[in-house]
Image (cartoon, rainbow, N blue to C red):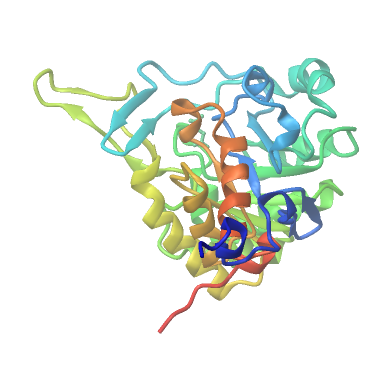
Amino acid sequence: MTTPPAARTAHPAVTPESVDLSVEIGPLRLANPVMTASGTAGLGLEMEPFWDLSLAGAVVVKTITKLPRRGNPMPRLAETASGLLNSIGLPNKGIDHFVDVVLPKLAGKASCLVVNLAGGSVAEFAELAARLDGRPGIDALELNISCPNVEGGNLPFARDPTVVERLVAQVRRATTLPIVTKLSPNVDDIAAVARAARAGGTDAISLINTLLGMSVDWRTGRPGLGTVVGGLSGPAVKPVALRMVYEVVRNVDVPVIGIGGIVDADDALEFLTVGASAVQIGTAHYRSPDVVPRVVEGLRERLAAAGRRRVAEQIGTLRVG
Ligand code: SIN
């Protein structure tokens, strides 16, 4: 007698549709743990031809600064083996344009909207945060203290725990919105920086931003990027990102959002297993703009197949030894 397909299923009661994907990141409750990473989905609106923004756990917009920025000289992107170098330089039209023009179009479209900010000083971060406080449609702020592509820019913030604590504390005083602080991998002790951000009052940590790197064409002698050095992202950085998430979750009591080289649901589940409460997807957008809804569906399928009724059951299940 042949066994009917349903009876062969290891966990017949769990279907992909029934898996609860909701997660909590401090005060934020997301419908699912899959977020866009700042920059790679533009201001969010650019993704609308590909998928409904409400399908993401959260949409994170490209970094907003106080004044408009033109960005860095071309070329700003260079492909490498399993990775992408960028030196974009935070081009944007400034916070006035964001508040007056972009936000009215964006508000209400994402189930959670996170605005990524960068200031040229601690005071400017706080000023930007205050400007967005109480604006309808914004659910959280992400502090970009880790962009490697701004001359004399904000990477030094991310490298000094004392400055990180002061910066986050000033932003904390300036806003009632949940704060996510985005850390750089270009530091000696990632846990020390995360601890400082937590002491300053951050609600969550996101990591990693890009790893400093460069490429060169030996025939022409030309570097791949106009600024020579930029930030590496994509699958090449995933092991580094996993290691840094691991170091933070082991050492600091703070919710973590994992970023780095995620292209599918398996990658996302690796970050959750190590202890991230959610993930952000960046570089993969350039290859498949529908990667976010695809990963959400992939999570449902894989978790159901593993007999998990809730994605939260998977978080922090790393088994060592
Ligand atoms: C950029 O605009 O240069 C990239 C943003 C970042 O790495 O934070």
Task: Say whether residue 103 is left or right of residue 211.
Answer: right
Residue at 90% x, 32% y is 136
Q: At which x and y percent is residue 131?
A: 83, 33
Task: Say whether residue 288 is left or right of residue 23.
Answer: left
Q: Quadrant of residue 11?
A: bottom right
Q: Is residue 249 above or below residue 155?
A: below
Q: Is residue 65 visible?
A: yes
Q: Quadrant of the C terminus?
A: bottom left
- Judged from this view, the residue extending furthest toward the front is 1
Residue at 19% x, 28% y is 216
Along the line of sight, the residue nearer the viewer: 260 or 266: 266
Q: Is residue 275 above or below residue 34?
A: below
Residue at 78% x, 40% y is 112
- Judged from this view, the residue extending furthest toward the left is 219
Q: At which x and y percent is residue 97?
A: 75, 17
Task: Say whether residue 221 is left or right of residue 38.
Answer: left
